Amino acid sequence: MSNPSLPISFADISAAAARLQGVAHRTPVHTSSTANARAGAELFFKCENFQRMGAFKFRGGYNALAQFSPEQRKAGAIAFSSGNHAQAIALSAKLLGMQSVIVMPKDAPEAKIRATREYGAEVILFDRYTQDREALGKQIATERGMTLIPPYNHAHVMAGQGTAGLELIEEVGTLDILLICMGGGGLTSGCAVAAKHLLPQCDVYGVEPLAGNDFQQSFRSGQLVKIDVPRTIADGAQTQSPGNLTYAVCKALLKDVLTVDDHALVNTMRFFAERMKMVIEPTGGLAAAAAMLGDSEGKLDVKGKRVGIIVSGGNVDPAYYAQLLRDGV
């Protein structure tokens, strides 16, 4: 399936896969008989928590920076991010020999701020509830002549993220359903393009936090909806509105956008820790929670299906992680 009106194509994802070969990890696909029994389905978990810098974001960040012109490389890259895109751009810039500046919310997990600095980036902190990160990023980009790479609403970023879905399907074959963690829609849109090209009959869903359902509202209303900064433990999905590019792809290719609440995310993190011996961050459990626990509206039926699930990342502060598993939300 190819739609020339969309901002990315399967060819873009294939080209991204070639750029990432030997640079990004080809992350494992894990299964769990307990998870299968709980869901009444065959679940295949694409574990991007084992990706470089701990999340799928490395794929899109590297794919974008690898296509810089010599002039762009000389000036460097700037990004705004709650953490994983920050680390992705910082590490990609380091690997490609360029400078990077990252605008991060001051309440981002300390582990993510520290890791971003350790990858060599200059970190500029802001208040996510009173300042506009996009405006701040554009201002600094103009002042320093740097190229701004947004966390999701960018064709090269979207194509890079889609390689996670491509790899999953290459490894496990036919899927009836693909569930993808959703914030701004970069991962979801890229994986949707890959899935609908390779498996046209596969139903693709984005899954976002119940408190931050900007994409669900936009998808179902047919127009971009903006919400207040959502208060959810899924810090990687605290978006206020979809990007116009990610929305165009998702509107065309998704079956629906589902939501799960923070309690479901904690339960999912606990399951991964206890039964699969894996650390995942709250955002990383969105898709898995919808499969194993049902979405917050109770409308997702996976019984008897082959279900692909993108586990998007594992970057979580250890003390906060322990607190969530012990006390919940």
Image (cartoon, rainbow, N blue to C red):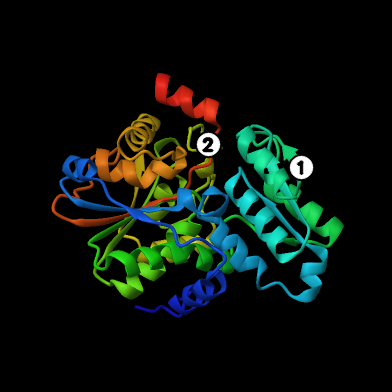
Residue 311 drawn above or below residue 70: above
Residue 278 drawn above or below residue 44: above
Of the 4 image quadrants, the one containing the N terminus is bottom left
Residue 328 appears in view: no
Q: Residues within 10 Å of mark 1 (few under 14, many from 20)?
A: some
Left or right: residue 139 compared with residue 178: right
Mark 1 touching mark 2, by CB under 8 A?
A: no
Give, as a three-letter code, the residue at label 1: Ile
Q: Secondary structure at mark 1?
A: strand
Q: Residue visible at 43% across and 62% down?
A: 164
Residue for badge 1: 124
Using the rendered view, name the quadrant where residue 277 is placed.
top left
Q: Position of residue 32 (x, y in %)?
A: 25, 46
Residue for badge 2: 316
- Of 114 and 234, nearer the camera is 114
Left or right: residue 227 compared with residue 125: left
- Of 203 and 53, nearer the camera is 53
Sequence-wise first label, 1 or 2: 1
Q: Position of residue 204 (x, y in %)?
A: 32, 60
Q: Residue visible at 25% across and 63% down?
A: 175
Q: Residues within 10 Å of mark 2 (few under 14, many from 20)?
A: many
Left or right: residue 284 compared with residue 141: left
